[in-house]
Amino acid sequence: LGIHFDHIWQKTLTVLNPMKPADGSIMNETDLTGPILFCVALGATLLLAGKVQFGYVYGLSAIGCLVIHALLNLMSSSGVSYGCVASVLGYCLLPMVILSGCAMFFSLQGTFGIVSSLVIIGWCSLSASKIFISALDMEGQQLLVAYPCALLYGLFALLTIF
Amino acid sequence: MPGPASKRRIPVSQPGMADPHQLFDDTSSAQSRGYGAQRAPGDLSYPAASATPQAAFLADPVSNMAMAYGSSLAAQGKELVDKNIDRFIPVTKLKYYFAVDTMYVGRKLGLLFFPYLHQDWEVQYQQDTPVAPRFDVNAPDLYIPAMAFITYVLVAGLALGTQDRFSPDLLGLQASSALAWLTLEVLAILLSLYLVTVNTDLTTIDLVAFLGYKYVGMIGGVLMGLLFGKIGYYLVLGWCCVSIFVFMIRTLRLKILAEAAAEGVPVREARNQLRMYLTMAVAAAQPLLMYWLTFHLVR
């Protein structure tokens, strides 16, 4: 089938540890299996929490991928393909799945919910920008890449909270 | 009789075919025997075989050709899209405006909120081309305006959400109205520049960049308004309006009035004054638009 489980696991570990610098070769082959799995998991946890919002999840991810693909193509010296962007963004959706999993058990609209969602958004965008920076060889731009990713994951968090 | 090797797919006349004028190959199973019989004698590339693998080989080259055609069509389509996008959106020119790094963005944001102490507003040039924004804080860029616009739309959604007036189509309405105002502004300024016959090196993209800087102040105002109510909104908005006014005057003065200063002796008073008025009008329009686009978000 072409699905390499150890690659998927390696990429997942890179996402889960945002402090460790990533090497640029992990994104050499773009696979969409992991991201699609995480998107479906997000939709499933949202469903279990009582919000039927599959359409918003997919539409938002498509538009967000397009915007970030355009931005990265303009900002980096080497271009980036759409599949690579979709793959990275999908992998870094994993902490958001954890957040919406928590939303099943207690409501996130209090202070603790807001603080934890801010932490999760920061986590997602830091890992995404870290992978983009190392794969595309851009220096001095990590925060600049992290900001639009944070906006995108912020929208996902809004979907999860409200 | 024509050789069988050259007419693999469309045998026109062969023994056993009912109609000598048949123009296409009838690949129903009844005919495959005749086909196989023709193929068997002199064919080297296909193994001489009975009728049933013959039908399978019929499917294979056709599907291979279909796949090759499909993939070449996809490649052609992608090339077409790339070429046309290059025609409408000058990608290499845009890349100049996105060559930023974090230090530049930090310094530019500081300049947008506090332009009073900055002395030198000239853009440095390097062999006739302006230096990339990474290296000169005075150069315009499109990263900040683009991000500021998107953040403004999201913050507007947030503000409407806290007033329980949120719905996704209202967000879309907000986004398109802000975009419409921006387009109107760009067109108005281009028109007035054309009427005043100013020769500047102010390109349209530069203008969009400069006009996009006010969204930063708007975001600040709305956020403060969300946190601290109307007082915070008016204070921060007032501060940002004055800052953006000073910023625009100082930046546009160099662009629009530059050659008036560089012309030297024959400075025509009326022309110079007109340009001064134009700069003041553009700079004054910014605070007005900042207020107009945000006051309904803060109650």
Image (tube, coloured by chain):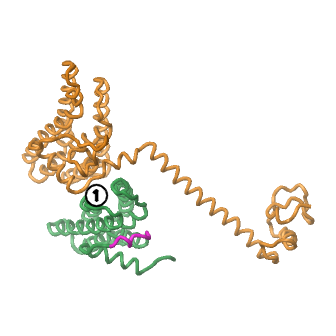
Chain colours: A green, B orange
Magenta span includes B178? no
Viewer-side residue, B41 vs B257: B257
Q: Name the spot of residue A74 as percent of width and height, x first.
A: 35, 53
Q: Is residue B200 left or right of residue B285?
A: right
The one of B102 and B120 positioned closer to us in this rendering: B120
> Where is residue B88, by image quadrant?
top left
Residue A12: quadrant of the picture? bottom left
Residue A104 seen in the current view: no
Residue A74 sits above or below residue A37 on the image = above
Looking at the rendered structure, the kind of residue marked 1 is Pro
Tell me which corner region of the image, top left, top right, bottom left or bottom right, holds residue B200.
top left
- Secondary structure at numbered mark 1: helix
Going by the image, does B56 lie left or right of B139?
right
Mark 1 — on which chain does it sit? Answer: A
**Does A24 appear in magenta?**
yes
Residue B280 at x, y percent in the picture? 17, 30
Looking at the picture, tell me which residue is in the foreground, B189 or B121. Answer: B121
- Above-or-below relation of B44 to B161: below
Dot 1 alpha-carbon crowd within 10 angstroms: few under 14, some 14 to 19, many 20 or more: many
Magenta segment boundaries in residue numbering: A23-31
Residue placed at 49% from the left, 50% from the top? B81
Look at mark 1 in the image and give the residue it sits on: A148
Q: Is residue B120 visible?
A: yes
Q: Where A81 falls versus B211 (above or below)?
A: below
Q: Quadrant of the C terminus of chain A?
A: bottom left
Residue at 23%, 43% (x, y): give it: B124
